[in-house]
Image (cartoon, rainbow, N blue to C red):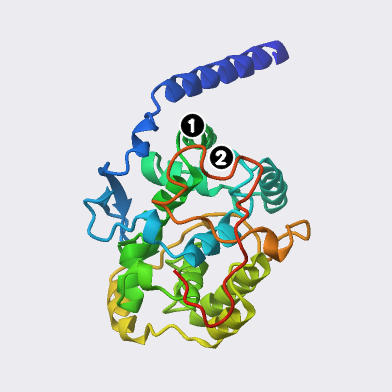
Amino acid sequence: MKKRILLAGIALVVAYVAYIALSLRALPPVEGLKNRRLSMTIQVKDWHGRFHPFVVGPKNRDWTPGSVIPPEMKWAVIVAEDANFYKHEGVDVKAIKNAIRYDLEKKSFARGASTITQQVAKNLFLSREKTITRKVKEIILAREMERELTKGRIIELYLNVVELGPMVYGIGHGSRYYFGKPASAMTPRECAFLAAMLPGPRVAYNPYRHLGKVMKRSEMILGLLRRKGVLSEEEYRQALAETPNIAGLQRKVDTALAKEPEPVQAPLSSAALPLPPTEAPATAVPPPAPEGAAGTEKGTEPASGAQPALPAPAPAGEGRQ
């Protein structure tokens, strides 16, 4: 009897491995993402659970090229979602180990440990289901993206597809929706505000229901930007003193939420705040070079394991790009 059970178990494992192998052979190629003129259509879900077509690329009127995304926006999501973005090659092994330990303690898939690259792979090509098969696909695609794309291209794709509100996808739409301005004109406080929403814009970090929680997290992110040298002391203090004006949108979201049940969304990332004590000194990691300049081709960005070494932020009073 025991032998039969053992053989049945082995057969199931072999069948599952074969299924995963076949699934991996059907993964889409990522080379096309190198073409910055490429536009592709994916499916995104609204807060009622319905799917809608969403254009990724220049044909989307809210598409924001990496060259005009404020460096504070890029670094806000890096320090909040994937502190080792410039060090890993698509997968953060240490974060995965911590997530497994946490999930075992909680007896659930509460923490995913996805890097920014993994989130791009999931958002563009995969479903949101929490299965081992999907996670394996996500890891394979993330490693392929790291081989084919620059870090700048990956962060550009990420920021243009993240969910920031009811059918609000990408920082271009998010900035216009919340602040009435293009993403290129966002202040450091506004950048940190959008980054603070990412773990759960539908419920946990919905600014209309939990504005204080979003503001507190955005202040933590601003503190990390100061430690990184992205913001000068004067810029940091000015950002803390600023309050994003989103009151005019209360009616929009109240109307949207009244038509649906309370949604539930798991965090996009398990990245914890603040950063670990082993993080580099504040002046070691300045803002990344704008897309469209020196960092648009493979080989011109920081090598894996190293972060960009540019001058420290400009003194207070000098304009930021």
Q: Which mark is residue 188?
A: none
| Label 1: few (<14), some (14–19) or many (≥20) C-alpha neighbours in 10 Å | some
Q: Position of residue 319 (x, y in %)?
A: 47, 76
| Label 2: few (<14), some (14–19) or many (≥20) C-alpha neighbours in 10 Å | many
What residue does disc 2 label? 90
Image marks 1 and 2: residues in contact by CB distance under 8 Å: yes
**For this rendering, which residue is in front, 216 or 63?**
63
Distance between mark 1 and mark 2 Cα atoms: 8 Å
**For this rendering, which residue is in front, 305 or 53?**
305
Q: Which mark is residue 144?
A: 1
User: What amino acid type should be assigned to the residue bearing mark 1?
Assistant: Glu
Q: Position of residue 148 (x, y in %)?
A: 46, 33
Residue appearing at x 63%, y 54% in the figure: 309
Secondary structure beneath disc 1? helix
Q: Position of residue 51 (x, y in %)?
A: 27, 51
- Quarter of the figure with residue 279: bottom right
Q: Position of residue 252 (x, y in %)?
A: 28, 78
- Is 167 left, or right, of 283 in this rendering? left
